[in-house]
Amino acid sequence: MHIPDGFVPPSICIAGYAITGGVTWYSLQQIKKDSNPQKKIPRASLFTAAFFVASLIHIPLPPASIHLVLNGMMGAILGYYSFLAILIGLFFQTVMFQHGGLSTLGINAVIMGIPALFAYHIFHFNNRSNTRKKIWTQVLAFCAGAGSLILSATLFTVIIITNITSELDAQTEINAIYLSLISYVIQAIIEGAFTVMLISFLEQVKPEILRQ
Amino acid sequence: MRLIIDRYAYLDSLIHRWQQKYKLVGLISLIFAFSFVQKITLLPVIVVITTVIFCLSNLPLSFLLSRLRYPGWFILAVVILLPFVAGDTIIFQWGWLTLKEEGCWTSILISVRFFCILTISLVLFGTAPFLTSIKAMRSLGLPQVIVDMTLLAYRYLEELGNMLTTMQRAIRLRGFRYQQFSRRNLKILAQLTGSLLVRSYERSNKVYQAMILRGYGYKIPQIDRQQKNRLSQLDKLNFLATSATVIIAISLTIAEILLPAN
């Protein structure tokens, strides 16, 4: 779900960098409000590496397999650090696997990072409402995992199909968007279920990871 | 997990000798100029520039080809699809299948632009150690929090990758088979990911304590600025190379604006 170099016009690349700059600045401001922001840097960094590695796990879905995106989970655990973590993860993917691109790093960060912040607010709605029921946590975890993937997929599909060439007619564009989104819905359900299972595991084994 | 992007960082070439900070400015401006190209007539120019830079870097061609393999599949899918769906001018028809001129040109434009940007990115990060690249970004004003997170994440990437491989081997030895999709398998994979996160969390607490013991967060006294600001002969050459690359990038952008539409 990353846009490679050369696929979208320069206006999209520039807009992507501008939005990423703004969201990065806002995230840094939120991080600075913390009582000891330095303490959380090693934790956020190791989780960045762990999520990067975990995204390489393939879920078998015969005849093919899918890999996890985990941006919703990153948002739920890392909060405002998640946007920075995604930016760094995308940079690593561009440099190490040539997946994505340097000119499109900004727009890719918007596609993956903004839904992660959305997932953070969805998941921590539980804390604000002071409801500690297990079922409620699971519902929010599913919404965070599946919702952020659907949001990322929608942004990705709309950006790439409407910008790749001006020669496509409107009906073809709409059909291509719907077709792409159908496949992503299946992935979103799996990702949502996976997030619920992962959150339940962490609640049992190390609940403080979810509370910080 | 193999992450070796800088395996040829210690070769000797003009590009290798170009200081990473200057190289970042020069080659990134070139990457953006390439992404601005929309006119077919400019494609041979960017191919020539890319070829010259790649030859100057002394990087083996096999290295470039091995890096093209993964993103190449995505490009291939688009390049095959676009000539049949985009445009109006039919150049070949076979039943319901129609090959369109505009789609063919768009495919060529996208694939050449992609190939050139990817090659320049590879030269940029393949000709210097990865840590040098991150330090160069810090000197160009990247926020400290992002620099620290990048350095630490990079430091533990390979270690956590190996940890995951060991854990996957362990669950396979206990009879877990990946081949089919089921609720049970998904739960096991979620627990595997959870264990990786728990281990990372415990490790991060120790890392933080070690960092504090080594003085993390305290400012190091600045070195003599006068000495730092004095431009050496090497700096002048670096500056010259960067200026030349930026001028090429600006010229390409101007040509893109002034040239008539395709």
Image (cartoon, rainbow, N blue to C red):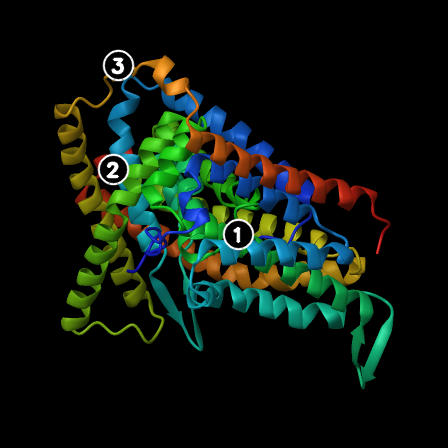
Q: Kindly identify which chain the residue marked by label 2 belongs to.
A: A
Determine crowd level at label 1: few under 14, some 14-19, many 20+ residues with C-alpha closer than 10 A.
Answer: many
Give SS at disc 2: helix
The one nearer the camera, B182 or B258, is B258
Q: CA distance from mark 3 to mark 1?
A: 37 Å
Residue positioned 37% across, 37% down in the render? B134
Judge left or right: residue B61 versus residue B161: right
Q: Amino acid at mark 3?
A: Pro
Residue positioned 47% across, 56% down in the render? A98
Give SS at disc 1: helix
The one nearer the camera, B55 or B66, is B55
Instruction: Return the mark for residue B221.
Output: 3
Judge left or right: residue A178 versus residue B58: right
Query: In terms of sequence position, does the residue under pointer 3 or pointer 1 come before the other?
Result: 1
Q: CA distance from mark 1 to mark 2?
A: 40 Å
Residue tagged by mark 2?
A: A209
| Visible residue check, residue A139 | no
Determine crowd level at label 2: few under 14, some 14-19, many 20+ residues with C-alpha closer than 10 A.
Answer: some
Position of residue A34 measured from the top left corner of the image (x, y, whole percent): 33, 19
| Visible residue check, residue A65 | yes
Residue tagged by mark 1?
A: B120
The one nearer the camera, A30 or B217, is B217
Asked whether the beta carbons under mark 1 and mark 2 sit within 8 Å of each other, the answer is no
